[in-house]
Amino acid sequence: MLTCDHPVPPDRYNDRVEEHLRVTRFYHASQIGVVQCQKALVNALIERWHPDTYTFHLLVGECAVNLEDVALILGLPTDGLPVTGMTMSSFEALEAECLDQFGVAPRKEECRGCCIKLTWLCDLKENFQLTDEISIQRYVKCHVMLLIRTILFGDKFGTGVHYKFLPLLRDFGSIGQYSWGSACLAHLYRALCRASRFNCKKIDSPLTLLLGWAWIRLPYLSPLPRKSRNFPLAKSFIYFFLFVWAAYDVDRVDPNIIPAEIYMQSVVWSATVPLVSFECIEWHATDRIRRQFGFVQEVPHQKWNLDKAHGEVLTGPKNLNWTTAPSHSFWVMHWTTNLYVS
């Protein structure tokens, strides 16, 4: 059985920076509390994941976590610029980036390769004096880096966050222009594809997203409320094969609790596009899960071959601009040009 750890999210931010956090579009993700991992459920989903189609194969048909789920479960932006850019393998580059953005840099022992240890970021955040615009922005960037590690891009080691994301935070006003939600979904797909291999022992992924999706789409699997059970127990079998295709209809979710800016992204949710996150390229196969968007399911298109872009990892020196890399540039352009084509 696979093991899966769910990290504790970072400490709550200072209320004085809320408006700045909203500018980054990470505000809603920052409201998520601790979600207890259910290993049996995660393992059951992995057993039904098909990496060749990027979908779960259930008795009711194919289904998957999609951009709509990301937007409504995590509140992350799903439109905008692809989350990609340069990766550098030197400590000197990491040090220079931290000095530029935080005014201070970690020591080598406070890093692990190209990852900044979470303990350093947590201590740094707690020591900021929120006296001016620069210190507030640095505080928020630090908090965003912690959210990136705990909510969006987990790893099996769980001690640090890759500094490749930090350059995307340089221009504070542009942080919210990136499609952090699609990058998060790409990371989940990548983790599911790897975990479906026979020799994989542990999964790293945004488990909050995966578990939230399972509890919403498969309500009979959701945790029982802390109250006495209803009788007769046989009623529970009614939902055994139920999958909620229209999970966010008004009769299931009060639209008034979801901010208007989230729905403004809905034009991209059903787009059949590559999902981009630096070295990670995965396929958003919405042509196979049309029923999740209230459409009639037709014969899906021929599967796209991601070729060398699929399975790329950041092991060893990788001084590379993934936007223009030969294996990735086509897919980055594909996202940019086909995002609003459903």
Image (tube, rainbow, N blue to C red):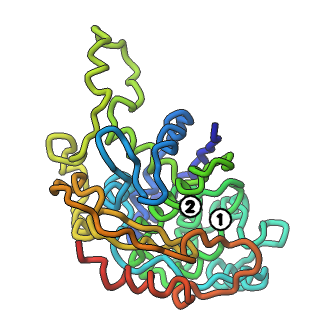
State the image coordinates of residue 300 (x, y, percent, origin top left): 27, 63
Quarter of the image with the C terminus is bottom left
The residue at 18%/50% (across/down) is 255
In front of the other: 46 or 99: 46
Q: Label 1, secondary structure: give it.
A: strand
Quarter of the image with the N terminus is top right
**Left or right for 158, reference 290:** right
Label 2 neighbourhood size at 10 Å, few (<14), some (14-19), many (20+)? Answer: many
In front of the other: 200 or 9: 200
Real-space CA distance between mark 2 and mark 1, rounded to the nearest whole angstrom? 8 Å
Earlier in the chain: of badge 2 and badge 1, it is 2
**Left or right for 93, reference 2:** right
State the image coordinates of residue 41 (x, y, percent, origin top left): 49, 36
Q: Are marks 2 and 1 in contact (CB under 8 Å)?
A: yes
Q: Label 2, secondary structure: give it.
A: loop
Q: Quadrant of residue 336?
A: bottom left
Label 1 neighbourhood size at 10 Å, few (<14), some (14-19), many (20+)? Answer: many
Disc 1 marks a residue whose amino acid type is Val
Tag count: 2
**As displayed, is residue 266 above or below residue 226?**
below
The residue at 26%/22% (across/down) is 238
List the residue tagged with mark 2: 153
Front of the two marks 2 and 1: 2
Whether residue 289 is visible, yes or no, is: yes
**As displayed, is residue 18 above or below residue 99?**
above
List the residue tagged with mark 1: 161
In front of the other: 205 or 29: 205
**Left or right for 222, reference 147:** left
**As displayed, is residue 325 above or below residue 83?**
below
